[in-house]
Image (cartoon, helix red, strand yellow):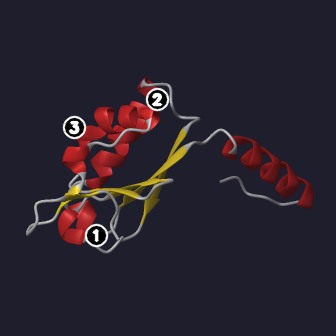
């Protein structure tokens, strides 16, 4: 983020960010809290960013690194917005499939949380 020193610079930055925001179709919120870091969330972030570049989707899909999302034993956790699709135990090797699926509006079923009792796959955390 640039150092803003004048009201004009703030207005200019706001205009640029607003123009860019209109291009974004999805945001991937990736937990980088302590538990997820221990489960290799940083390499996941790096792999997802690399795939965005390789697939030419940097302007359409945004990565947002977050703090703890509260489901540490399932980390690294990725939530796709809009839709709140909840992916767990995401590995760097999943990045290419995850990015291409998000761009097509599809869900990667194998990365969804699986209820240990019913064995049902859950699309959202709630």
State the SS at label 2. Answer: helix
For label 3, the residue is: 93
Residue at x 88%, y 60% (from the top left corner): 6
Residue 91 in view in this figure: no
Q: Are marks 3 and 1 in contact (CB under 8 Å)?
A: no
Q: In this view, does 37 lie to the left or right of 119?
A: right
Q: Residue 34 carries which label?
A: 1
Q: Residue 53 carries which label?
A: 2
Q: Where is residue 100 in the image (x, y as percent from the top left)?
A: 38, 31
Q: Which is nearer the N-term, disc 2 or disc 1?
A: 1
Q: Do the residues labelled 2 and 3 touch (CB within 8 Å)?
A: no
Spatial separation of the CA atoms under disc 2 and disc 1: 27 Å
Q: Is residue 123 placed above or below 126 in the rendered structure?
A: above
Q: Is residue 94 placed above or below 9 in the rendered structure?
A: above
Q: Quadrant of the N terminus?
A: bottom right
Residue at x 43%, y 32% (from the top left corner): 104
Q: Is residue 28 left or right of residue 14?
A: left
Q: Residues within 10 Å of mark 1 (few under 14, many from 20)?
A: some
Comparing marks 2 and 1, which lies closer to the viewer?
2
Q: In this view, does 12 lie to the left or right of 103?
A: right
Classify residue 93 by image quadrant.
Answer: top left
Comparing marks 3 and 1, which lies closer to the viewer?
3
Residue 71 in view in this figure: yes
């Amino acid at each position: 983020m640039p150092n803003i020193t004048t009201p004009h610079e703030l207005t200019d930055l706001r205009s640029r960010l607003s123009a860019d925001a209109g291009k974004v179709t999805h945001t991937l919120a990736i937990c980088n809290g302590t538990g997820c870091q221990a489960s290799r969330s940083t390499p996941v972030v790096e792999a997802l960013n690399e795939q965005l570049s390789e697939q030419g989707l940097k302007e359409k899909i945004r990565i947002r690194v977050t703090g703890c999302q509260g489901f540490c034993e399932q980390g690294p956790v990725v939530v796709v917005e809009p839709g709140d699709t909840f992916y767990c135990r995401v590995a760097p090797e999943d990045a290419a499939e995850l990015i291409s699926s998000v761009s097509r509006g599809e869900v990667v079923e194998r990365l969804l949380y699986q209820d240990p009792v019913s064995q049902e796959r859950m699309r959202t955390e709630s």
